[in-house]
Image: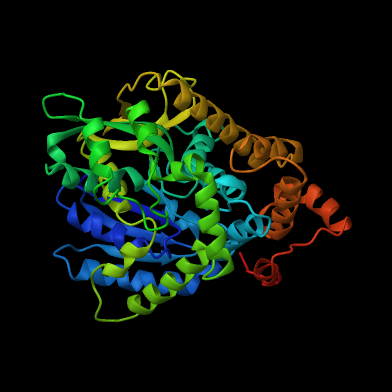
């Protein structure tokens, strides 16, 4: 990463609606992160979006004081060659795949969410083989680069890169901790700098504590305030209150996604109402994305539109861009990241990936020790981590039995014949993106397994060229 020549950044999934936010973050940090060129990469099916958002990205740089060239390509190797940083924000199968992930479980009365339940596992099945291909390309083309991942499920993807890709220069990110740390200081009527945060757990399954600048734990005070105002949730999570007594007992604040586990009954009921009326979250997001790309087409638009905040991943650039700047300039900034545990959470093995508060610098993440979690949370954490490990193994091996084990262990998938039916239908629905399961899928086709949800079934008929 020679400072004289400037920095080359490659973004896989560059046609994403999030890209303008990434550009905004880089522009804001240019003085400490002197970028020379940015390469936005996508696949043939994403060509139109790539061209639209790529022009938008270049306009943003042209409107800034900085001379940065945005390159657009469908050739991943061209983009990765000699890159200093690689960011990943791709979605295998596009939003249509997410719609299937959500609607097929919902048809049978179970949660189908982007990173939780059956849908989250299938997103991992599709994403992990691709991220490992990217890592192999990086070993050849940019062996000194850092990989900064935002592709969901971020924790599992990062774990796969470390455990199976044997690539340690990787950091996984999420916007959820960022949003919590943006909204909670306002509830406490202080500045973020006046608070000391400690996060621990897994991506979309963490807890945190808060202290004041004198080191006094004020988590219980924050819990009181959470029932008075904005809880800092992403747009994709229904704002259903936790049971306050539960939070007081654990003396920690759960991640917003814990609602799917702590209040599964109500969250499922809400999801089913949307499934039957306005459509699942993915269907809603697809409409939002259509509107965003219409905005991005405006040749006079050279800044991130406010509507982007309606997407579930708003503000992630504050984590992604700050992480890159912190590594480049050895800033030792405190950021919540997915990284190798190394003892920060003693309830899990040292070599597995966790989501924790860390100081990020030239050598990557140096974790802040959190210590053991209380009894209930420790139990949840260990179940979820082992479910993740089984999901990753199934994604790599294509073994049906391992996938079934992961399904059985996942708390949001009620085990039994219905779960088996969901597993089989999702395999059929995502045939195009699951070559590792080809033998099992061929067997299911011979058995006559078909997708029952009408909208998901129609999407299965639409062929997307990859």
Measured from the top left, where is residue 343 in percent x and y? 40, 18
Measured from the top left, where is residue 394 in percent x and y? 67, 39
Please tell me which residue is depicted at 55% across the width and 52% down the height of the picture: 268
Does residue 94 appear anywhere in the picture?
A: no
Q: How many marks?
A: 0
Please identify the quarter of the rendering in which residue 297 is found: bottom left
Q: Residue placed farthest to the bottom in the image?
A: 299
Does residue 5 appear anywhere in the picture?
A: yes
Identify whether 459 is placed above or below 434.
Answer: below
Measured from the top left, where is residue 16 in percent x and y? 42, 63
Q: Residue placed farthest to the right in the image?
A: 446
The residue nearer to you, when weighing 6 against 432, is 432
Does 354 sit left or right of 111 as displayed?
left
Does 304 sit left or right of 87 as displayed?
left
- Quadrant showing the C terminus: bottom right
Coloration of the structure image: rainbow
Please tell me which residue is depicted at 42% across the width and 48% down the height of the picture: 150
Identify whether 336 is placed above or below 10.
Answer: above
- Quadrant showing the N terminus: top left
The residue nearer to you, when weighing 252 against 154, is 252
Measured from the top left, where is residue 216 in percent x and y? 16, 24
The residue nearer to you, when weighing 27 against 249, is 249
């Amino acid at each position: 990463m020679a400072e004289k020549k400037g920095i080359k950044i490659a973004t896989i999934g560059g046609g994403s609606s999030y890209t303008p936010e990434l550009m905004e973050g880089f522009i804001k940090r240019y003085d400490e992160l002197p970028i020379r060129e940015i390469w936005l990469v996508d696949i043939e099916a994403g060509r139109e979006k790539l061209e639209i958002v790529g022009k938008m990205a270049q306009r943003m740089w042209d409107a800034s004081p900085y001379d940065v060239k945005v390159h657009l390509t469908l050739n991943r190797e061209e983009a990765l060659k000699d890159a200093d940083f690689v960011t990943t924000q791709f979605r295998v199968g596009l939003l249509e795949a997410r719609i299937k992930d959500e609607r097929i479980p919902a048809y049978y009365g179970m949660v189908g969410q982007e990173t939780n339940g059956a849908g989250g596992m299938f997103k991992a099945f599709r994403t992990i083989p691709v991220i490992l291909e990217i890592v192999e390309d990086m070993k050849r083309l940019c062996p000194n680069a850092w990989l900064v991942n935002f592709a969901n499920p971020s924790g599992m993807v990062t774990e796969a890169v470390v455990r199976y890709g044997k690539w340690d220069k990787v950091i996984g990110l999420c916007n959820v901790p960022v949003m919590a740390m943006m909204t909670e200081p306002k509830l406490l009527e202080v500045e973020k700098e006046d608070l000391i945060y400690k996060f621990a757990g897994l991506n979309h399954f963490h807890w945190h504590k808060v202290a004041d600048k004198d080191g006094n734990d004020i988590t219980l005070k924050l819990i009181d305030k959470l029932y008075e105002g904005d809880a800092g949730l992403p747009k994709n999570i229904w704002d259903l209150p936790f049971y306050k007594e539960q939070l007081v007992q654990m003396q920690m604040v759960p991640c917003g996604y814990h609602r799917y586990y702590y209040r599964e009954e109500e969250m499922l009921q809400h999801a089913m109402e949307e499934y039957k009326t306005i459509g699942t979250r993915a269907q809603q997001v697809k409409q939002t994305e259509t509107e965003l790309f219409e905005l991005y087409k405006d040749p006079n638009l050279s800044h991130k539109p406010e509507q982007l905040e309606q997407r579930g991943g708003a503000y992630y650039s504050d984590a992604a861009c700050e992480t890159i700047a912190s590594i480049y300039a050895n800033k030792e900034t405190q950021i919540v990241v997915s990284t190798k545990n190394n003892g920060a959470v003693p309830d899990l093995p040292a070599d597995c990936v966790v989501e924790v508060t860390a100081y990020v610098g030239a050598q990557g993440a140096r974790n802040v020790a959190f210590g053991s979690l209380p009894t209930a949370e420790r139990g949840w954490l260990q179940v979820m981590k082992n479910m993740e490990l089984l999901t990753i193994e199934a994604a790599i091996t294509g073994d049906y039995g391992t996938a079934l084990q992961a399904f059985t262990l996942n708390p949001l998938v009620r085990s039994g014949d219905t779960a088996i039916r969901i597993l089989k239908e999702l395999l059929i629905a995502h045939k195009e993106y699951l070559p590792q399961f080809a033998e099992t899928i061929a067997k299911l086709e011979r058995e006559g397994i078909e997708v029952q949800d009408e909208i998901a079934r129609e999407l299965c008929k639409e062929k997307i060229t990859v």
